[in-house]
Image (spheres, rainbow, N blue to C red):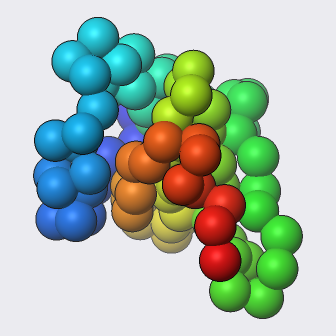
Amino acid sequence: MSWKIRVDRRVKKDLKTVPKPVIQRIRLKMESIAENPVQCEHFALKGDKLKGFFRLRVGNWRVFYTLDNDNQEITIWSVIHRKDAYKK
């Protein structure tokens, strides 16, 4: 059973800076995660503020998202270039 993918409204603004071929790659990766989130290559982020968030690498871009096991829902919160992703 596939999980539902929910995209936060802020992501639409983020995607305006992402090249179209990269958006396609992000879509494909997120669909593969939705098919089986347990067997995927996402990485849990560490730190109090980031607890519960995961990061997906797509080339030089990072996708930050959370998993809701109860509702089987993936929420994408941000898509950002790696040079800006880890700034405080």
What residue is at 83 percent from the left and 70 percent from the top? 46
Regarding residue 67, the answer to whether it shows in the image is no
Please state the horizontal and vertical placement of residue 29, each as a whole percent of the image: 48, 23
Q: Identify whether 75 is placed above or below 56.
A: below
What residue is at 54 percent from the left and 54 percent from the top? 84
Regarding residue 64, the answer to whether it shows in the image is yes
Q: Residue furthest bottom?
A: 48
Please state the horizontal and vertical placement of residue 38, each as a whole percent of the image: 71, 39
Please state the horizontal and vertical placement of residue 10, each as a whole percent of the image: 22, 65
Q: Identify whether 32 is placed above or below 76.
A: above
Specify the quadrant that holds the N terminus: top left
Q: Is residue 43 left or right of residue 56?
A: right
What residue is at 69 percent from the left and 29 percent from the top? 40
Specify the quadrant that holds the C terminus: bottom right
Please state the horizontal and vertical placement of residue 68, each as a whole percent of the image: 51, 66
Q: Nearer the viewer, residue 88 or 34?
A: 88
Q: Is residue 82 left or right of residue 24?
A: right
Query: Based on the displayed image, in which of its 4 quarters is residue 24 positioned?
Result: top left
Q: Residue furthest right?
A: 46
Q: Nearer the viewer, residue 57 or 84?
A: 84
